Amino acid sequence: MEQARPLRARALVVEDDPMQRQMIGLLLEESDFDVIECASAEAAEAVLQRDGEDLDLMMTDVELAGYKDGVELAHIAKRRNPALGVIVTSGKPLRRKLPDGAKFWSKPWAPLDVIREAERMVLARARA
């Protein structure tokens, strides 16, 4: 008899720099996350419409390719899934308000911080 595989946490990584996006994705995959990668807020919004309720974490840069930025995307994501863990990052100071529960990280950040925070967010969501 085949054993059921435990559900893995799911993360959406939104970053227009391919190397940054790949690095974050690899960090999360090493921590047993299924990762969806997007280069723009518009592509991420399509993922949120399709899979938003099934996501545990979204990590996005503020500056993205396309017409929307990471702050707008954070608001869209939290409206669609209020329990979603959201991390917004930038190398510049953030001058706009994030939705309740979203976190801002100034670049550069430590790779280990991504793993720790992702795991913390998943545990918090599981308890909710």
Image (cartoon, rainbow, N blue to C red):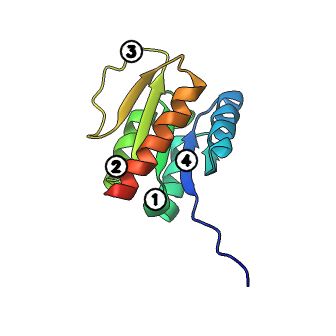
Q: Is the residue 31 above or below the residue 93 in the image?
A: below
Secondary structure of residue under mark 1: helix
Compare marks 3 and 1 and give the one earlier in the sequence: 1
Q: CA distance from mark 4 to mark 2?
A: 13 Å
Contact check, label 3 and label 1, Cβ < 8 Å: no
Task: Kindly indicate whether the residue at mark 2 contacts the one at mark 4 (C-beta within 8 angstroms).
Answer: no
Question: Could you tell me which residue is drawn at 50 percent across and 35 percent down?
Answer: 116
Comparing 16 with 116, the one in front is 116
User: What element does badge 4 sit on?
Assistant: strand
Residue 47 quadrant: bottom right
For the point 42% across and 44% down, the residue is 121
- What label sits on residue 19 in the rendered view? none
Q: Is residue 99 left or right of residue 84?
A: left
User: Which label is found at residue 93?
Assistant: 3
- The residue tagged 2 is 78
**Label 2 sits on what residue type?**
Lys
* Label 1 vs 4, first from the N-terminus: 4
Decide if residue 84 is in sight here: no
Label 3 to label 2: alpha-carbon separation? 21 Å
**Residue 86 at x, y = what percent?**
41, 41
Q: Is residue 121 visible?
A: yes
Q: Mark 1 is on which residue type?
A: Gly
Q: Mark 2 or mark 1: which comes first in sequence?
A: 1
The answer to whether the residue labelled 4 contacts the one labelled 3, judged by CB atoms less than 8 Å apart, is no
Q: Quadrant of the N terminus?
A: bottom right
Instruction: Identify the mark at residue 52; answer none if there is no mark.
Output: 1
Please state which amino acid type lies under the numbered disc 4. Leu
Category of crowding for the residue at label 1, using alpha-carbon neighbours closer than 10 angstroms: few (below 14), some (14–19), many (at least 20): many
For marks 4 and 2, the one nearer the N-term is 4
Type of the residue with mark 3:
Pro
Q: Residue furthest front?
A: 1
